[in-house]
Image: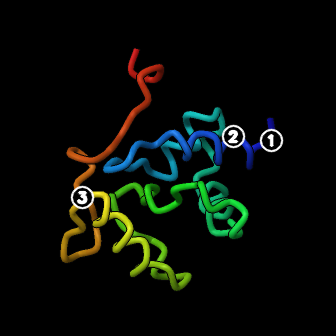
Amino acid sequence: MSFRADVLTLVKEIPKGKVMTYGQVALLIGSPQKPRQVGMVLRGLKDVDGDVPWQRVVNAQGGISTYKVGTGELQKVLLESENVKVKADKTVDLKKYQWWPEKAED
């Protein structure tokens, strides 16, 4: 598969109410040096990719980085609709909400 396809496949697996970081996605698809490219893939999604829960990917501090590209408020609303609490500083508690696939936990 391509890098883009690998990113989208993994992001589609993130359950509602959970998040992953850009770096975590990059690590789990075998490209640990490419967290920014993960962000670029997600930022480039079109309506045709509507089944990809892009909102479930946050930065390494649990922060919503998409305010820079104009979708931060949407990401916050989508996360909160999945019962992910977004704090006043626009971060989520990674200890509570970060998800690791079972295969990565073994």
Q: Secondary structure at mark 1?
A: loop
Q: Secondary structure at mark 3?
A: loop
Quadrant of residue 65 within the rendered picture = bottom left
Mark drawn on residue 2 = 1
Residue 17 % position (x, y) = 31, 50
Structure colour scheme: rainbow
Instruction: Kindly identify the residue that appears in the image at 46 percent across and 23 percent down.
Output: 104
Instruction: Kindly identify the residue that appears in the image at 43 percent across and 60 percent down.
Output: 59
Among all residues in the image, which is located at the extreme top?
106
Q: Earlier in the sequence, mark 3 or mark 1?
A: 1
Whether pointer 1 and pointer 2 mark residues with C-beta atoms closer than 8 Å, the reply is yes
For marks 1 and 2, give the CA distance. 6 Å
For marks 3 and 2, give the CA distance. 27 Å
Count up the numbered dots: 3
Q: Is residue 104 above or below residue 13?
A: above
Query: Which amino acid type corresponds to the residue marked 2 in the rendered image?
Result: Asp
